[in-house]
Amino acid sequence: MSYFDAVELEAIKALKARYFRLLDTRQWDAWGDVFTEDVVLEPAAQMVFRGRAEVVKNVSTLLNGLQTVHHGHMPEIDFIDQNNARGIWAMFDWVDGHGRSMTGYGHYHEEYRRDADGKWRIRKLTLTRLRMDVATKQEEIPK
C-alpha cells in the first residue's frame, strides 16, 4: 500500500464514521455533506433516492420519531484512481420506535469520489441485508 492509499483510506474511514454519527444524532445538514450532490442512495429494495437534497429529506422523514444506532465494520476499500474508490462495509443497525424494534445486519456497498473541494464523499450507497429481526412492543398496561 502506498502512502497515498494509507492517507486516503483513513480519510474514507473518517467519512463513514461521520456518516454514522451524524445520522444517529440527527445532524441533517452536516450529514448531507457526506454525500456528493449527485448521490444515489438505495437503502432498501425498491427504494432509490437521487441527489443530496432528496436523500436528506427522505431519510430524515423516514427516521422521524425513531431512535437509531448504526455501526460499520471491516471496511474493504479499493482505489480506482486518485479521486474515486469503492468499498464494502459490514453493518449493524438498530431502529426503535412507533411500537416496534428492528435489528439488522448486512453490508453497505459504496462508491466514493473526491470532490473539487478535496473532500471524499459518498457518491453511491446500496444497503443489502442478510438478516432483520423485528419485534413488536406490547402496550404497557396502566397501573
Image (cartoon, rainbow, N blue to C red):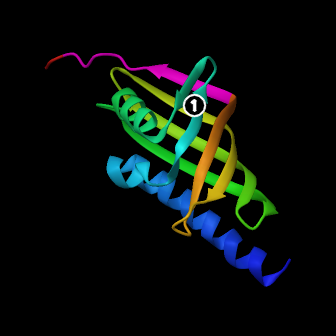
Q: Secondary structure at mark 1?
A: strand
Query: Where residue 3 appears, x then y in whole percent?
Result: 78, 83
Query: Where residue 47 appears, x then y in whole percent?
Result: 57, 21
At 36% from the left and 33% from the top, the residue drawn is: 57
Q: Residues within 10 Å of mark 1 (few under 14, many from 20)?
A: some
Is residue 18 depicted above or below 93 in this figure? Answer: below
List the single residue furthest toward the right: 1
Q: Work out whether residue 111 or residue 93 is closer to the camera in this orientation and state it.
A: 111
- Compared across the picture, whether 10 is left or right of 67 comes to right
List the residue tagged with mark 1. 43
Q: Quadrant of the N terminus?
A: bottom right
Query: Where residue 11 appears, x then y in whole percent?
Result: 61, 70
Kind of residue indicated by mark 1: Pro
Image: magenta residue range: 131-141
- Compared across the picture, whether 136 is left or right of 16 comes to left
Residue 136 lies in magenta, yes or no?
yes
Query: Quadrant location of residue 109?
Result: top right
- Compared across the picture, whether 106 is left or right of 79 comes to left
Residue 85: tell me if it is visible: yes
Q: Work out whether residue 116 or residue 99 is closer to the camera in this orientation and state it.
A: 116
Is residue 45 depicted above or below 66 in this figure? Answer: above
Query: Quadrant location of residue 54?
Result: top left
List the single residue furthest toward the left: 143
Residue 27: tell me if it is visible: no
Query: Where residue 116 appears, x then y in whole percent?
Result: 55, 64
At 61% from the left and 17% from the top, the residue drawn is: 46
At 64% from the left and 20% from the top, the residue drawn is: 45
Residue 41 lies in magenta, yes or no?
no
Is residue 127 depicted above or below 120 in this figure? Answer: above
